[in-house]
Image: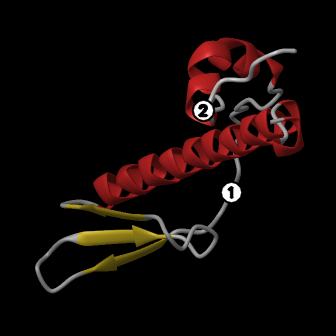
Amino acid sequence: MSVLPSFPISPEEVFDLFGETLESMNDKRIIETPIFVPFIIEKTEEEFYTARCNSFRLCKGMGVTEEEAIENLKEQIDSYHKSSIETEKRMRMEEIIKNLFRKDHF
């Protein structure tokens, strides 16, 4: 008769133990391609420029010049994409872990 540990291994511990293996199982990657979306540039009362894009409502760039505002917006959009991919990877890893360590086995 096997004795199970009193505390089952947590998902965080599995991530620590199998993180690299689980990462390699994920087929998500970033491919950079030019996508043309309109940016809206506005000048504020404080003499700053803001750049926004309706396609990425959570992203906004600000700067002293229009170019700086656009560059900051591009960086925000890039961060948003990377964050979305990392979130999806984490969700897939959690799904794998749930399937490996189903509660009915403990």
Residue 42 at x, y = what percent? 34, 79
Residue 51 at x, y = what percent? 40, 68
**Dot 2: what SS?**
loop
Which image quadrant for residue 26? top right
**Closer to the observer: label 2 or label 1?**
2
Residue furthest left as drawn? 46
* Side of 29 where 68 appears, left or right: left
Which image quadrant for residue 41? bottom left
Residue at 75% in and 18% down: 3
* Side of 2 where 32 appears, left or right: left
Q: Looking at this view, is 36 or 97 the one in front?
A: 97
Q: Earlier in the sequence, mark 2 or mark 1?
A: 2
Residue 96 at x, y = what percent? 83, 34
Q: Looking at this view, is 49 or 8 the one in front?
A: 8
Q: Measured along the vertical axis of the image, is residue 10 above or below residue 47?
A: above
Residue at 64% in and 19% down: 19
Residue 15 at x, y = what percent? 61, 25
Which image quadrant for residue 1? top right
Residue highlighted by disc 2? 7
Kind of residue indicated by mark 2: Phe
Residue at 19% in and 71% down: 48
* Side of 83 where 67 appears, left or right: left
Residue highlighted by disc 1? 36
- Whole-Å distance between the Cαs marked 2 and 1? 52 Å
Q: Which mark is residue 14?
A: none
Q: Is residue 33 visible?
A: no
